[in-house]
Image (cartoon, rainbow, N blue to C red):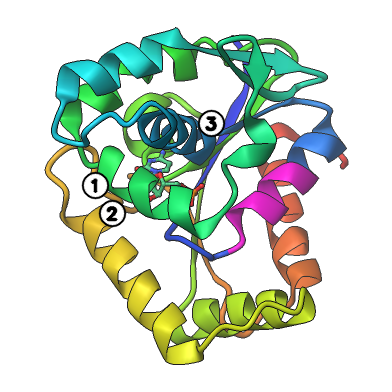
Amino acid sequence: MTNVITIDGPSGVGKGTISEYLSDQLKWNYLNSGALYRAIAWVARNDSINLDDIIGLECASKNIEFSLKSKKLKIVYKNKEIGSLIYNEEVAKIASKVSSKPKVRQSIINIQRSFKKEPGLVAEGRDMGSVIFPESQLKIFLTASIETRAQRRFKQLKDREFNVSLPALIEDLDARDRRDKERKSSPLVIPEGAFVIETDDLTVVEVKKAVNEKVNETYGTDI
Ligand code: DC
């Protein structure tokens, strides 16, 4: 049996930081499932595929090569590595729309499951524990209020000298939350049996500590 830890939660809650940390510590594979939706979004924009053209989107998803390189996701489209091109607000907005389409979600279920490989997998997203890996031994769900998440993002962007407004970030997160929670196919839910960590009043170090304790409790591994 291959081990899987799932980490789900809303946008901007810090899933990436925690999942990357945990997969590095455990030396397990790391699936950032949001990157798959972002890659499809990037291709849709690049190839001018209308977001209502479901067949076009399905086709796009089939033509993207997703693989693991040094335990992390590698994304190639038409012989070009596109992993570094998908982390921007424009792609995020399209990804949010693309990910609400049931057929698009269906088209990448098997790809996501294929990343479950020895010595184990840390899978991060919105439906990792509820739909993709319901068999996972440890399901973690991170939460934080929309204000906390917007403040963190605001600080990150300011530090990188981006000019952003806090109300605009809150509005954007609110729209994404609604799309994640209200879509019919695999909405964002707390998976059954998940360990919920409210991160509003916790530092990153404290969240890592809480996760480590849960991992030790589940696997008896000292990490
Ligand atoms: O986590 P992220 O911001 O990179 O995700 C990009 C988009 O994909 C976001 O709108 C939520 C969606 N997503 C999803 O619907 N299901 C997942 N398992 C992961 C991401």
User: Pointers 2 and 1 in contact (CB under 8 A)?
Assistant: yes
| Left or right placement of residue 38 versus residue 154 in this view | left
The answer to whether the residues at label 3 and label 1 have Cβ atoms under 8 Å apart is: no
x, y percentage for residue 191? 35, 45
Q: Which mark is residue 137?
A: 3
Please tell me how crowded label 2 is: few (under 14), some (14-19), or many (20+) other residues with Cα within 10 Å: many
Horizontal and vertical percent for residue 118?
71, 10
Q: Of residues 129 and 188, which is closer to you in this image?
A: 188
Please report the residue visible at 34 percent of the width from the left and 53 percent of the height from the top: 190
Ligand 1 within 8 Å of disc 2? The answer is yes
Q: Position of residue 182 (x, y in %)?
A: 16, 56
The segment highlighted magenta reads 14-21
Quarter of the picture for ligand 1? top left
Ligand 1 within 8 Å of disc 3? The answer is: no
Q: Is residue 186 visible?
A: yes
The type of residue carrying mark 2 is Asp
Which residue has dot 2 on it?
Answer: 180
Q: Amino acid at mark 3?
A: Gln
The residue that mark 1 highlights is: 187
Seen in the picture, residue 24 relative to 152 is either above or below; the reply is: above
Q: Main secondary structure of the magenta part?
A: helix
Look at the picture and state if 209 lies above or below 171: above
Would you identify the image quadrant in which residue 24 lies?
top right
Q: Nearer the viewer, residue 137 or 7?
A: 7
Mark 3 falls on what kind of element?
Answer: loop
Residue 140 versus residue 137 in the image, above or below: below
Q: Residue at x 75, y 79 (%)?
A: 161
